[in-house]
Each structure stands twice: as C-alpha cells, then as structure tokens.
C-alpha cells in the first residue's frame, strides 16, 4: 500500500493503533514480507502470538483439513477438536479435575476468569479482585478495570467496581489488600505489556500462600507468558509446585494467530459455572481448536519450550553484550524468549522505527522499553542477525 492508500485505510479503520508505516503481504517462518517482497526479521511475532513462526505447515495443514470438514456448529453441540484440546490443556497443566472454557481472545479468557471467581464466591458475597499496578489484562470493560494502568481508564469511567490494585512484586501488599470482600488475586507471572517486569523468586509462591490462607482464588494471566514463551510450558512452573494457580488464562500463542482464548480452572472453580452462566457463539470452534492442537503438538514434538530457554539465554547474552559494547545506559531483563531492553531515555519508538527500516521488527512496549518476543522456533543465527541490525541502529542513535 502506498502512503496514500494507507491514508485511505486510516480513513475507514478506527484509529486505535499507531501503526508502523509498512504493509505486510505474507509471512513465512521468522520473516514477514512487504508488498515489494522485502523480508523483515520478525522479533515481535504478532505480539507473542506466532510462536511457531508464520505459515507453519502443521497449523496450515490442520486448519485446511478441518475447514474442509466442519467449520462451525455453535456451542450447542459437541465437536471433537474442542474436547481433545481441552483434554490436552488440562493434561499439560497436570489438572485431572481441570475444566476449560474456550473464548476468542486473551481479554475474553480473563473476562471468563473474573466472572468465574465471582460466581464461585457468590454465596459469601465476595466479589473483589486484587490486581497489580502495571498489569495488562485486556480491553473489555472488566479486564480494563483489572488492568493496573490508570491512563487507559480515563476515557471510560465509570469502570466496573470490584478491583483493588497494589504494587507488583510486593507480596505483603497483596496480603494487606486481600479482605473479606476478596474473591481472587489476578497476576501475570511476568508483566508483559507493563514492560517485561520479572518479579523476585519468592513473589508468586508467597502470593499462593496468602491466597491459601485467605481462601481466595489465585488467577494467573498467562495470555502472554503461557505455552513456552518464558522457557516453561507455563510461567508459574518456574516455581515448581509452589505457585500453581486455581485458574489460568491463555490465548496468543495457543492459536499461532487464529483467534482463541482459554480459561482453565481446577478444584471448586472448575465446576463453578453451570449452563447459562457464560457463553460464546464461536469460541473453541473446530477450526481454531484444530489449529491449537497442531500448535501444542509442534511445541511438544520440536522441544520448543526447552528451545525458548536455550535460545532465550543466547539472545539475552547477546543483548547484554550489545549494551556493554555500546556503553549504553540500559538494562536487559526478561525470561526465556520474552526479553526487554530498558533504555535510559524515551527512545524506544525511534529505535524500533530505525530497526524497521533496516528490516528488523521489534516493539516499543513502553516509551523507554524495547521488547523482544520472537517465534520460539528461532535459532542462534536469527538472534545474530537481529543483534547485528540492532548494533547498527544503536550506533546511529544518540544514547
Ligand atoms: C497478559 C495479557 N493479558 C491479556 C491480554 C489481552 O489479550 P487480547 O489482546 O487477545 O485480548 C494481553 C495482550 O497483550 C496480555 O498480554
């Protein structure tokens, strides 16, 4: 699309995004290609979505096969792919009593989790959810209210009531905030949109203990961290069995770009909903479920969780080396293949724009933070390619 065509697109699409000035026509593996056929090494992966890379043959084949057989029935009927996917997810989580609700996005998966805990505590009239400042849980009214970023609230007040926010990585603050009104604590194992913030080792286990002691649900939003991204199948598994949630939300990588979200609950929460309590017409349909099964198969077969850990270490070291060799006032942080550079100034957008013009996609998740969340399939060669481009870009930037 020419600049004029992009202007025309802006005239008919709501301006909710500040888009980069590029139009992608196709994708394959680690690369997106613009209309002229120019490749761009993709270290954004559709915001941690295309974990297998673009046009992965296993997903393409599963979708094509299922689309030719059965696309949609509504949730009034049973379909095999959904049942199989639910079993795979509860199996991966090790929750034999787990139950899944399939939605179409991360926000919807969280919306389900929030409704679920309200329903579970209905009899006690406990309705509040304690969440963290800096968190991101989605853009529906309830998930927006749960999101700990007041700047995103302003235009939409009054927000739904029932959310209390405390500083992230501060377990005593959670302990102080949980009250007789609380139903749940909702947290990300690593805050993604908040700037790739990794809490201290003791945080989630301590929060788990607080939830146990107070009898409230621990809900972990693993929309971004789940399915291998942090070098574990699920982010909470970094703590062994010390931070196992009662409810987990998943989305993003689950469909590798096909729209699916999942809210998985165990114990008393697994059976808190009854018929009519929650619904979606197309959620967990046969095609997205087939896509998700192909995603899980591929992550398992190709050892991508382990790979995220190993290649993530390599990329992290490379980024640290870059920081050192350029004498930059920046820090590297993150887990697995969810990494970030904290810059000394609000130059993330300028760096991302300069990287784009050099054929590398990176994301300015905050004004002073660059995020790196490439496909889990990348290797050291792609990391080197990205680091070379970044080095070139940084050389040309005022530090
Ligand atoms: C942790 C987390 N939760 C929820 C969401 C919302 O997901 P979606 O955009 O699919 O609604 C996101 C999206 O970035 C996220 O990172």
Image (spheres, rainbow, N blue to C red):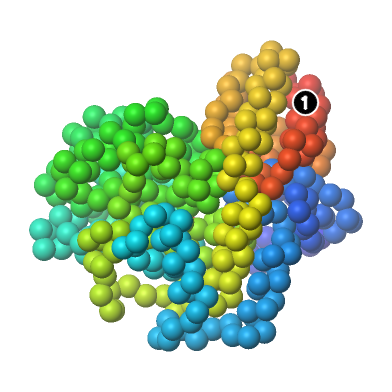
Q: Please say if 291 is above or below 240.
A: below
Residue 333's x, y, as percent?
A: 55, 28
For the view shown, which residue lies furthest in the right direction?
Answer: 36
For the view shown, which residue lies furthest in the top direction?
Answer: 327
- What's the residue at 11%, 47% (across, down)? 180
Q: Which structural element holds mark 1?
A: helix
User: Is the N terminus in the top left, top right, bottom left or bottom right quadrant?
Assistant: bottom right
Q: Is residue 314 visible?
A: yes
Residue 279's x, y, as percent?
A: 37, 75
- What's the residue at 57%, 66% (across, down)? 293
| The residue carrying mark 1 has its beta carbon less than 8 Å from ligand 1 | no
Residue 379's x, y, as percent?
A: 73, 40
Residue 399's x, y, as percent?
A: 69, 18
- What's the residue at 16%, 48% (across, down)? 215
Q: Is residue 254 left or right of residue 108?
A: right
- What's the residue at 81%, 42% (across, down)? 359
The residue that mark 1 highlights is 391
């Amino acid at each position: 699309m020419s600049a004029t065509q992009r202007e025309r697109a802006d005239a008919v699409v709501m301006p909710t995004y500040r888009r980069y000035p590029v139009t992608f026509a196709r994708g394959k593996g680690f690369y997106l290609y613009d209309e002229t056929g120019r490749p761009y090494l993709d270290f954004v992966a559709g915001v941690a979505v295309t974990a297998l890379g673009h046009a992965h043959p296993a997903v393409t084949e599963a979708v094509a096969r299922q689309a030719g057989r059965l696309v949609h029935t509504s949730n009034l009927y049973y379909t095999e792919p959904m049942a199989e996917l639910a079993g795979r997810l509860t199996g991966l989580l090790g929750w034999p009593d787990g139950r899944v609700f399939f939605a179409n996005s991360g926000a919807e998966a969280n919306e389900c989790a929030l409704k679920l805990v309200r329903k579970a505590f209905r009899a006690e009239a406990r309705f509040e959810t304690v969440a963290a400042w800096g968190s991101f849980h989605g853009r529906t009214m309830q998930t927006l209210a749960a999101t700990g970023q007041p700047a995103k609230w302003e235009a939409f007040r009054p927000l739904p009531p029932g959310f209390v926010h405390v500083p992230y990585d501060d377990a005593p603050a959670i302990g102080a905030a949980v009250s007789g009104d609380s139903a749940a604590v909702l947290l990300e194992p690593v805050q993604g949109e908040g700037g790739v913030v990794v809490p201290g080792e003791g945080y989630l286990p301590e929060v788990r203990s607080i939830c146990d002691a107070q009898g409230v649900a621990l809900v972990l939003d693993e929309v971004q961290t789940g399915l291998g991204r942090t070098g574990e199948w699920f982010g909470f598994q970094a703590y062994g069995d010390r931070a196992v949630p009662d409810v987990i939300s998943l989305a993003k990588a689950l469909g590798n770009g096909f729209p699916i979200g999942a809210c998985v609950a165990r114990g008393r929460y697994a059976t808190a909903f009854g018929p009519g309590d929650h619904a979606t017409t197309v959620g967990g349909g046969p095609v997205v479920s087939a896509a998700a099964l192909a995603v899980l198969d591929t992550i398992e077969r190709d050892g991508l969780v382990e790979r995220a850990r190993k290649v993530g270490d390599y990329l992290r070291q490379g980024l640290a080396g870059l920081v050192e060799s350029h004498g930059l006032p920046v820090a590297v942080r993150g887990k697995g293949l969810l990494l970030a550079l904290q810059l000394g100034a609000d130059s993330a957008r300028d760096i991302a724009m300069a990287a784009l013009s050099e054929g590398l996609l990176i994301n300015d998740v905050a004004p002073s933070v660059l995020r790196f969340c490439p496909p889990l399939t990348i290797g050291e060669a792609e990391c080197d390619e990205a680091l070379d481009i970044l080095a070139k870009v940084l050389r040309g930037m005022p530090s």
